[in-house]
Image: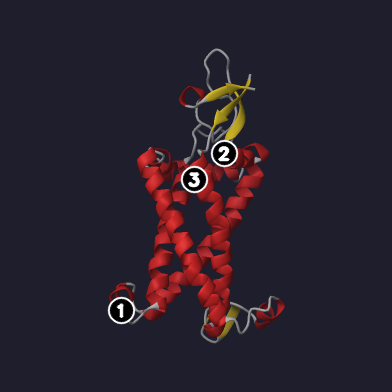
Amino acid sequence: MKQLIEKHPLAIRWFHWVNFPVLSLMIWSGIWIYWANDVYRLGWGDTTLFKFFPKSFYEAFHVEYKLAKGMAWHFVLMWVFFLNGLLYVLYTIFSGEWRYLLPNRHSFKEAIQVMLHDLGLRKEPLPVRKFNGAQQIAYTSVVLMGLGSVLSGLAIYKPTQLAWLTSLLGGYEFARIIHFALTIGYVLFFIVHIAQVVRAGWNNFRAMVAGFEIVEVDPASHQVQAGPTALPAADASLSSK
């Protein structure tokens, strides 16, 4: 029997859809700033495998000569990013949603099983829960990354006024490395996250838009028979479909 199960509250969906475009724009404006001192690369000694970013990249996207504009946009968007993240954390605390999101002592072991399942090396079905161990670790890590980005960003934006914070993060240069590395982390998270959404299918994406997903439920036991990230029917709000 197919039923609709409430999966994501309105607040979670709101924070999710605000955060994605804001963070994307912050990364873009951050590239305008980075252009003025693009020192990072992958390589060793005098050998460079990849430079962040080649001159052709700046020319193709017209990034050059926008330092002041980038700083203005970056700082304004930082407040939206920070307030949205703060409200999200407060919501998860007061609503009890943190119980589903916060990793526990089983999360790391389960995350390995999830990875093996995604790679096709594990055939057994994953536990039927709202968020599996891999998701708990990933989503909690992103929150901590957000805090790290705000602190490191302030440290390199106001290194004199916030000298204590800059020193705490290892100095200006190291704080800038932290800020840049976290940005790379967001990009990788986006790629994996979008790939997982595509892999999970339309039903999962619709749940993040509308808040509900369609699952198969055993009429006798009221247990979910399909949907690896759904809650058991007994623990969710149900309506017939």
Residue depicted at x 42% and y 38%: 100
| Dot 3 or dot 1, earlier in sequence | 3
> For the C terminus, which image quadrant?
top right
Q: For the residues marked 2 and 1, what is the alpha-carbon distance in whole angstroms?
A: 50 Å
Q: Callout 3: helix, strand or loop?
A: helix
Furthest residue toward left: 164
Question: Local crowd at mark 3 within 10 Å, few (<14), some, or many (≥20)?
Answer: many
Q: Callout 2: helix, strand or loop?
A: loop
x, y percent for residue 102: 39, 44
Q: Amino acid at mark 1?
A: Ala
Furthest residue toward top: 220
Task: Classify 35 as above or below 81.
Answer: below
Q: Which residue is mark 1?
A: 163
Q: Amino acid at mark 3?
A: Gln
> For the N terminus, which image quadrant?
top right
Residue depicted at x 53% and y 50%: 16
Task: Classify 162 as above or below 138.
Answer: below
Question: Local crowd at mark 2 within 10 Å, few (<14), some, or many (≥20)?
Answer: few
x, y percent for residue 138: 47, 51
State the scheme by which the image is colored: secondary structure
x, y percent for residue 154: 39, 72
Q: Nearer the viewer, mark 3 or mark 1?
A: 1
Q: For the residues marked 3 and 1, what is the alpha-carbon distance in whole angstroms?
A: 36 Å
Q: Is residue 201 visible?
A: yes
Task: Classify 45 as above or below 210.
Answer: below
Q: Which residue is mark 3?
A: 135
Q: Which residue is mark 2?
A: 122
Furthest residue toward bottom: 46
Q: Quadrant of residue 219?
A: top right
x, y percent for residue 134: 48, 45
Q: Nearer the viewer, residue 226 or 17?
A: 17
